[in-house]
Amino acid sequence: HTDLAALFIIFGGSGDLAQRKLYPALFNLYRKGYLKEHFAVIGTARRPWTDDHYHEIVMTALDNFDEDQATKEAFVGHFYYQSHDVTDAKHYETLKALASQLDEQYELHQNRIYYMAMSPRFFGTIASHLGSEALLTADGFNRLIIEKPFGRDYESAKALNQELTQTFDEDQIYRIDHYLGKEMIQNIVALRFGNGLLSGVWNNQFIDNVQITLAESVGVEERAGYYETSGALRDMFQNHIMQVIGMLAMEVPVNFTAEDVQREKTRLFRSIQPYSPAEIKQNFVRAQYAETSVDGENKPGYQQETNVAPDSQTETFVAGKVMIDNERWCGVPFYVRTGKRLARKETQINIVFKKTGVNIFADDKSDRSAMAPDVLTIYVEPEQGFSLTINGKEVGQGFALKPDQLAYQYDEQMLADSPEAYERLILEALNGDGTNFTHWHELAASWQFVDAIREVWDADQTPLPGYSIGSMGPKEATDLLATTGAEWIFDP
Ligand code: NAD
């Protein structure tokens, strides 16, 4: 590997994301040799910590690594702490001085990555100060990695984007969606564009419907305060699910580069069929997990959780049917669902193919009900792999069709070296590759679609349907598919 030189300035260096994801990701890049001598990290947060205390925090974040202590200490030695109030201009001057000093000390060629790992309400403020206090360097690269949520609707996202673009150009902004860093989401592109067998049938002539499930088994946990202002539509659909749709449905990019991929995803999002308010009610379902007795124990419903309003209208589940108005996809529903407190934690994609025109094995050849559809399943997590379910003949006398699975599961050993999402994405940002980051145009289109749904929902104060903890959501989510004769393939 080439020795990448850069200074990371992490805003929110004492936070949960930094400790759970960013420090382990940086350590992985270090132990794999991407980062060697020429890097330094400034962690900033409000608290007045010493470098020594900060080192202990970073060290603790590396607990799960088997590496020897000396390697860890050498790594942690590159970390510096700066107590920082994001609204105080003076603090940026101190930060700038430290940055320049480290730049010289570690020979970082003025390359900087600014990582926003704190409350989104500060994203704009920090970016403005980075500009006004002149932290951006003249010679090296200056890249901004920005966490979700990027706004809470189109207008706020646009305002934030305007604030950021006063200091950073679009190609310096890396809007992170960690779903795009997942191995199997990356694999979608390989499956689609690396196989003649699949690329030939990847359209409405052969595909009946597409299903995306992002199921969580946990509830809101300690994030209720934030979740109350967000809900599943904003928290999961607007970003992760939309990006998965993008990867599954975009047209073939000219090249596998940021410019081409982002352009195709943008085009795709702009082709999503806009819904009238009546269509939204028909095609999007929201619900909340309800108090449920599990093994004789009463589990609180969403409205009973701490910091949740007892009459909260925040959805913890959303299912929807997304239609794409272009030549490739018109007529093919993309069914999506996500929710908390579902049967199990699993992200799965099912591409459901059309059945043959006639069933020559049935007395009534038009009766295709005994014939299961062929399904390509992509297991995103926790298992990773894919399977193709196709019909064969049941062994023995007589003739009955029986679905069989050609399955390919990545094993532990293969996955051991697979980079975690943050590790992959941080390295890509270091390399200046924005392919797996989100362009403003993608976000804008995705927010506009989501805002229309939000508006209809917010105007409707009827209590949300409930669903049992441990189920796969309310009955309405099943009915959504039934209208076209389809059913959810993933049914744990
Ligand atoms: P957190 O509350 O754990 O950390 C916030 C950090 O900001 C802390 O270091 C805190 O000291 C600092 N901070 C707060 N106010 C400050 C101020 N006025 N001046 C200076 N520093 C201040 O939050 P988090 O969970 O780490 O999340 C950070 C961002 O990452 C958020 O945008 C969140 O949506 C996003 N995110 C987090 C996760 C996760 O797993 N935690 C996952 C995806 C996205």
Image (cartoon, helix red, strand yellow):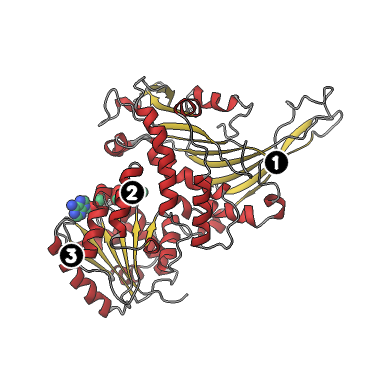
Packing grade of label 1 (10 A; few <14, some 14-19, many >=20) is some
Work out how far the residue at label 2 is from the one at label 1, CA to CA, in angstroms: 37 Å
* Marks 2 and 3, the one that precedes in the sequence: 3
Across and down, in percent, residue 393 comes to 80, 35
Q: Is mark 2 in CB contact (under 8 Å) with mark 1?
A: no
- The one nearer the camera, 196 or 63, is 196
Task: Place residue 73 in its image quadrant.
Answer: bottom left
Looking at mark 2, is its residue's CB closer than 8 Å to ligand 1? no
N-term-proximal mark, 2 vs 1: 2
The residue under label 2 is which amino acid type?
A: Lys
Q: Compared with residue 213, is residue 296 higher up or lower down, i.e. above or below? A: above
Q: Is residue 413 above or below residue 121?
A: below
Give amino acid for label 3: Tyr
Residue pushed farthest right? 397
Q: Give above or below for 24 relative to 401.
A: below
Front-most of 376 and 452?
452
For numbered disc 2, what is the local secondary structure? helix
Verify CB contact (< 8 Å) between mark 2 and mark 3. Answer: no
The quadrant in which the C terminus is found is top right
Residue tagged 2: 158
Residue type indicated by callout 1: Gln
- Callout 3: SS: helix
**Cα distance, mark 3 to mark 1?**
57 Å
- Count of labels shown? 3
Look at 77% across and 35% down and name the residue there.
356
Label drawn at residue 92: 3
The residue wearing badge 1 is 205
Label 3 neighbourhood size at 10 Å, few (<14), some (14-19), many (20+)? Answer: many
Left or right? Give the position of 88 relative to 268: left
